[in-house]
Image (tube, rainbow, N blue to C red):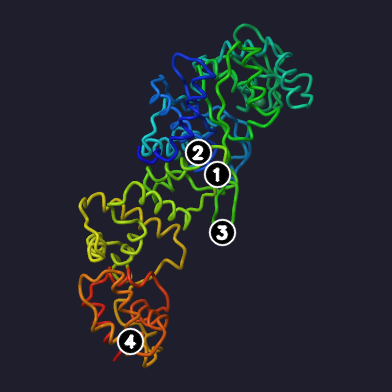
Amino acid sequence: MSGEKTTKHWAEEIAEEVFKRRSAKKHVVATGITPSGHIHIGNLREIIIADAVRNALLKQGVDAEMIYVGDTYDPLRRRYRFLPEGYEKHIGKPLSEIPDPEGCCKNYAEHFLNPFLESLEELGIKIKLYRADELYKRGAYADAIKTALEQRADIKRIIDEATKRRSPEDWSPFNPICESCGRLTTTKVKGFDADGAFYECECGHGGFASFKGGGKLTWRVDWAARWKILGVTVEPFGKDHAVAGGSYDTGVRISKEIYGYEPPFPIPFEHIILKLGGQLAKMSSSAGVNIPVKEILEVVPPEILKYAILRTKPERHIEFDPSLGLLSIIDEYERRFAADEVPFRQLVLHVHLGRRPHSEEVNLSLVRAAAERSGYAVKDKEAFARKARYAERWLQRFAPESMKFELKAALPPEAKTLTEEQKTALQALASMLKEGMTAEELHDAIYAAAKGAGIKGTDAFRAVYIALLGKPSGPRAGWFLASLDKKFVKRRFLEAAA
Ligand SMILES: [Zn+2]
Ligand SMILES: [Zn+2]
């Protein structure tokens, strides 16, 4: 993948460190997410880092695979804003056991997991997928749960020491799922045998929960247990897990002291901060401040999205601005890796010209004609169409208003405001127009026309925009005129000057 060229450096450095510090016949690079809401671009960083490191390991001749654990057995924490009122009653139940809020998938967890998995496919990132509920139900955790209950006091001590807090005396590493109310956040373990635990629930029910699917380890213990169960040797995670006393610290001790397993090589990474309308906002799927990965992949090709994340080292935060910020990253990517294609920025201009009056629909052959008039050779029509669609959607969703315009089908009424000198300039410009003029030649022609009419260049530019768009500003005029049919422009300028 070409986008990795610039960042090969950090991913390869990490791979070398992994090789030195964590021995393994085959490396297992782990990622995972709780699918409680739309999986957003912030979550994607973990996956892209893991993918880069896995690829770097493979490149160094080290066997490696990447796994992804959907934390489908985590409980619903609260009723998020996007959930219907009736979902109050599901709080505390595992996500895999809650119905899909939109009714289209097998359960709640799948509803948010599915689009993300599709995005990974689009990004070309190969993963081995595990669903936590399936791991629990098939008994993969059974031994780990039993060990955790047997060594409950030691685990409690490790966590209390690390967090400098005292957990309640009856703290349990295992949360049974109540058979009556379905919650795992309201039960207390009262004892256990070789196959399961006895519990009482706040709902009044008491029963027996099997170690095979009858409940779940608490997060800090679950994470450490998972390392051994899945043989994890490398794991990137958000820096909040990496703080002193955080879940990686306790995970390391639980892994070594309780499960006798060498913890994975950690790759802590900084957050992606979303920049919308110039404002920074930490992304959170539950608060609704996020852009789902699937939505970003509709406006930008996968290789560029990867590049946008890989160009920054994991320890540095990323300000992700889907508007002009993303456009600059696309420019940068194209300069490096796609210099022979029609630039995205130009396509954003051309897409405007593919629109019929009063229609949202974009006619691709008109877009192509605009690109070709601007001097770009369209070699691969399909690739061109694909890119034009991205530009169109980016324009609709993330372009600032200042970048949007409409080429008027008839002389706009604003043309009445043109001064005599501006009209003279337009007339002069009309006589200079020829098919095949470059953006630069057109730019110079506008200045020449202004000079001839005795006005400032800016007044001539304004006249051009008013005659074509009905407003005093628009896209860079040379490029704009280059992309238009000159006969049409000539007629319009003469009409405006009359
Ligand atoms: Zn669904
Ligand atoms: Zn209950």
The residue under label 1 is 272
Q: Residues within 10 Å of mark 1 (few under 14, many from 20)?
A: many
Which label lies toward us, 4 or 1?
4
From the viewer's perspective, is residue 141 above or below residue 423?
above
Q: Is mark 2 within 8 Å of ligand 1?
A: no
Q: Which mark is residue 45?
A: 2
Which amino acid does the dot numbered 4 rest on? Ala
Q: Position of residue 48 (x, y in %)?
A: 46, 36
Q: Is residue 447 left or right of residue 91?
A: left
Q: Earlier in the sequence, mark 2 or mark 4?
A: 2
Q: Is residue 453 above or below residue 322?
A: below
- Residue 438 in the image: x percent, y percent? 26, 69
Indicate the quadrant containing the N terminus: top left, top right, bottom left or bottom right: top left
SS at badge 1 = strand
In primary-sequence order, the first of circles 4 and 3 is: 3
Give the farthest residue toward the top.
194
Nearer the camera: disc 2 or disc 4: 4
Q: Residue at x 61, y 12 (%)?
A: 259
Rendered residue at 70%/29% (across/down): 244
Q: Single out the mark in the foreground, 4 or 3.
A: 4
* Amino acid found under the numbered disc labelled 1: Ile
Q: Amino acid at mark 2?
A: Arg
Look at the numbered discs 3 and 1 and tell me whether their residues touch, using CB distance below 8 Å.
Answer: no
| Dot 4 or dot 1, earlier in sequence | 1
Residue identifier under label 3: 278
Residue 216 seen: no
Label 4 SS: helix
Q: Which mark is residue 229?
A: none
How many residues crowd around disc 2 within 10 Å: few (fewer than 14), some, or many (20 or more)?
many
Q: Earlier in the sequence, mark 3 or mark 1?
A: 1
Q: Is residue 476 above or below residue 249?
A: below
